Amino acid sequence: MDSGPSSVGGTNIEGESPQVEPTVETDDATITDDAELERTLGLTGGLAIGIGTMIGAGIFVFPGLAAGRAGPAAAASFGIGAVVALLVALPTAELATAMPKSGGGYYFISRGLGALAGAVVGLSLWFGLVFATAFYLVGFGYYAVDTLAEVGIAVGDGLVIPLALLFGAGFTVLNVTGTENAAKLQNGIVVLLLSILVFFLGYGGLDAVGLIGDSAAPERFAPFGTMPVLTTAALVFTSYLGFAQIATVAGEMKDPGRNLPLSIVGSVLVVGLLYVVTIFVATSAFGADQLSEFGETAMVDVGRHYLGPIGAFAIVFGGLLATMSSANASVLSTSRAIYAVSRDALLPRRASRINLRYGTPHVALGLAGGPILVLVATGRVELLAEVASFLHLIMYGLICVALLALRRDEPAWYDPDFRVPGYPAVPAIGAVASFALIGFMQPVSQLTGIAIMVAAAGWYAYYARDVTLKGAL
């Protein structure tokens, strides 16, 4: 990888250089092309982004869908997802402490494997996060309608998509007004959400094992065999995208050498445990077939089974909070991926401009919010989830490969505060596991993901093939 700068269209490409270029006056505010984002996020903020993003889909949208595919063995599907996520989270944590820059996986891969791989991953990450955010917002719409129904306001499923669109636009505007505002909302939602979940899962777990209430009739663990467990793991892997989103905002983390590894690895461990317990509790309340019939809001019926109307309301309110936090964090992360790619001139540099009134990349936020709203309008929950998983798994595999390449070359600037235990086995297995999980996805999801990657490579060949990236520091 060439470590020297080059220019494209007269623009000097310096990675994330601290040098500030001339500002541009607009009617709205002063905007600069090369100002740095402020480091306003601490450990709590990092954990809130990771946990808040992952809890939404895994606990409140997927149990019914996953149980229909794999039966009670859906718990194993979530467990497989957690292991793969952890194998990638450790290399991600090392790379993040070496390169605490906005952009996460894109930044790591572009510096480890070159501009072409970086461009394909960066542009694919943009769309992968867009698909994931749209999935979270559609889930939010379902839970918003159910919340209204629990308080006696029946509006029907026809309001699901309009509510998702409305709040998607609202989260975009909130993130424009400041990262700190979005982080405060995220922190508050996650604390309240975890309180609800710990109480509910604690009670449901005691009931499921027969310590309180009636013992549940045992059900065959894997009624459909092994293959559905793996295909379900590929579907639900969307639930584990939150740890990588912490890396996309690494440029805004305080004390990144400490807070990034704790946030990235800690969020995977906490959420993985919650997922497995949730599926156990849900399948203990109902058989897998009946749980599947309840669909995206199956957990509402689980809550009603254990705690009556109070339990149902707690779940719909918790689902509302969870999908809100997932969508809010994903809008933030999507914009930072666009911001990082633009700063390297793989997209027009205007997309990386920062509004100095709010200190946010407002153009990148617009480029995130617009496509998200278009996909929300489709309402295709499973397709949105799997395409997001496909694109992220490609990135995760290449993150592990990038770590192996950087450890091999050890450039002068590579000095991480955290190093992966079990190297090189952990990143090697993480890469193989990430790529292998793709093979268990539906063909339409695979083809959609491949088409996005081919389009990203085409954009690179057309627009940015002459770009040479400087080293990370």
Image: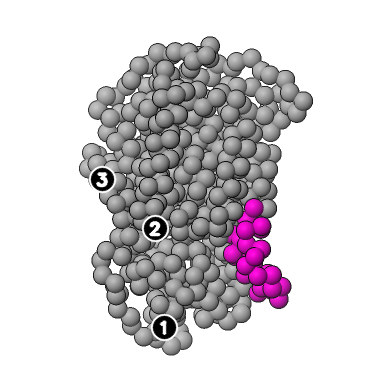
User: Whole-Å distance between the Cαs marked 3 and 2?
Assistant: 18 Å
Residue 244, horizontal then vertical, whole percent: 44, 44
Label 3 belongs to which residue? Answer: 432
Q: Mark 3, mark 1: which one is toward the viewer?
A: 3
Res 381 seen here: yes
Residue closest to the eye, 120 or 96: 120
Residue that lies at the very extreme toward the bottom in this rendered image: 214
Per the picture, the main secondary structure of the magenta-coloured stretch is helix
Q: 445 or 257, which is in the foreground?
A: 445
Where does the image place residue 268, in percent across and percent down from the top left? Answer: 41, 52
Residue 104 visible at all:
no
Amino acid, disc 2: Leu
Inspect the image, locate mark 1, and give the three-letter code of the amino acid beneath it: Leu
Q: Is mark 1 on a helix, strand or loop?
A: loop
Quarter of the picture containing the N terminus is top left
Against 61, is 437 above or below? Answer: above
156 above or below 48? below
Q: Distance between the residues labelled 3 and 1?
A: 42 Å
**Is residue 164 located in the magenta-colored stretch of the structure?**
yes
Q: Is residue 456 above or below residue 173?
A: above
Q: In which quarter of the image is the C terminus?
A: top left
Q: Between label 3 and label 2, give the one nearer the viewer.
A: 2
List the residue tagged with mark 1: 211
Label 2 Cα neighbours within 10 Å, binned few <14 / some 14-19 / many ≥20: many
- Magenta segment range? 140-165
Left or right relative to 273: residue 323:
right
